[in-house]
Amino acid sequence: MKIFRSQKLQELALDGDLVRNVAALYGVQFAGYLLPLVTIPYLTRVLGPATWGLVAFSQAFGAYASLAVEFGFGYSATREVAKSRHSKDTLSNLVAGVVGAKVLLAVCAVTLAIVAEKWIPLFRRHAIFFWAAIFWALAQSFSMFWYYQGFERMRFVAVLDVCGRALATAGIFILVRHPSDGWKVLGLQGAGALFSVIVATVYVYREVPLRLPSWTLIWETLQMGWNMFVFRGSLSLYSTGNIFILGLFAPAEAVGFYAGAEKISRAFMGLLAPVHQSLYPRFSHLVKNDRPTARRLARLTLLVMSAMGALSSLVVFLAAPRIVRIILGKGFAPTIPVLRIMAALIFLDAVSTMLGMLWMVPLGLDRSFSRIVLAAGILNLALALTLAPHFAQIGVACATVAAEVFGTSTLYVILQRQGLNPLASPRRE
């Protein structure tokens, strides 16, 4: 009886940690999605569709730079921290390898940015927007969030992130007064991210010994993150990359209309992200140590997240005119049909994240997952390049949804074929 009680208390403690982590991540999500939504009604009215589109176009390119530097460590390094929590030596090597790899990748990203500025007309004409976006991208890509997430103690870094973004939000309301101030939006967001990175890094090195990375260590770290980098890169082909593709074929106003719908739909998707992020290290642990419990948790999570995603999609579809009018303003009426199309992404993202990121990756199916996402990304790229010149923002929205439907369906089929569908009766574990 004492052993039983001890086990139950331990499980309750774990559940308590999970709840606290979810709460902390909702704080980060509030800062990352809801705080920008607070500024959007102000910015769309102050900057207008054209400058708002220019900010979104520059930020889309910056997102690629951030992706290249972050290199999927937000998942791969988190998993390694979760596995090596009690080994200071392993953690020290991991931190050194990740930081060293990011510095190397940042140098490469800046070099490519110099080339891109000369080749893309919008960036040549608006260089200050471009370099503000690069600053923002590099600042946020050095986040140490992966370290704290691996330990399942995100409250401290969550507070830092919220503070940095809140300061950036306050700065936007104070300093952005005219369309020519649009670049300050990116600069202020970058400054807020840099504040969080500096403080979090100092505290990480209070816990693990400072170690300079060797070339061997950097190479091993890059190999560790490769599959997740392919996944993130493929995913970007039908997320932020679509804004960039649209900007190559359509005027800045069209980019602004699409970006408004994209940010609103992503904000609703973000409402479920804290639950996903908190469950990721839990699934990584359970899959290794208690597969039946992991499967039961996967089934429950999939059902709950799917229901919440479907409800959110329906709400956004029905309320699109009012949402656009309140958040973006009357000048963004062309965004309404785009948002209605992209409302489906909220449900699809909830399902695909559960099947892929929270289930396939902890099971060790990184390569299969990355290939599926890559195939969906290539499909989106082909559709976007075909539809954008003729149908502008509507065409790109349709391309995004089509690619997500393909990716989600393929994930389900692969898991079903391998007997790993969490909704199906399990094979012998």
Image (tube, grey):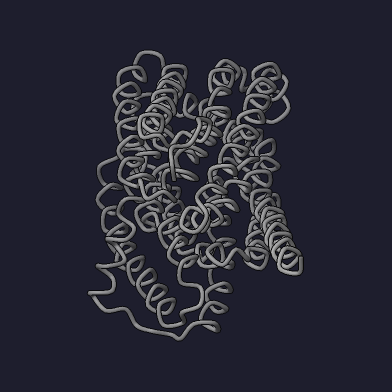
Relative depth, front residue between 373 and 11:
11
Q: Is residue 179 above or below residue 169?
A: above
Q: Is residue 193 visible?
A: yes
Q: Is residue 351 above or below residue 429?
A: above
Q: Is residue 155 left or right of residue 351?
A: right
x 66%, y 33%: residue: 45
Task: Provide residue 323's location: percent of width, then percent of height.
Answer: 70, 25
Task: Provide residue 127's location: percent of width, then percent of height.
Answer: 39, 49
Task: Provide residue 229's location: percent of width, then percent of height.
Answer: 34, 51
Q: Is residue 319 left or right of residue 381?
A: right
Q: Is residue 171 visible?
A: no
Task: Provide residue 255's location: percent of width, then percent of height.
Answer: 47, 29
Q: State how many labels appear.
A: 0
Quadrant of the rendering where the N terminus is positioned: bottom right
x 27%, y 79%: residue: 214
x 45%, y 29%: residue: 252
Name the quadrant containing residue 298.
Answer: top right
x 44%, y 55%: residue: 75
Q: Is residue 112 left or right of residue 252?
A: left
Name the quadrant containing residue 69.
Answer: bottom left
Quick one: which residue is furthest to the front in this view? 1
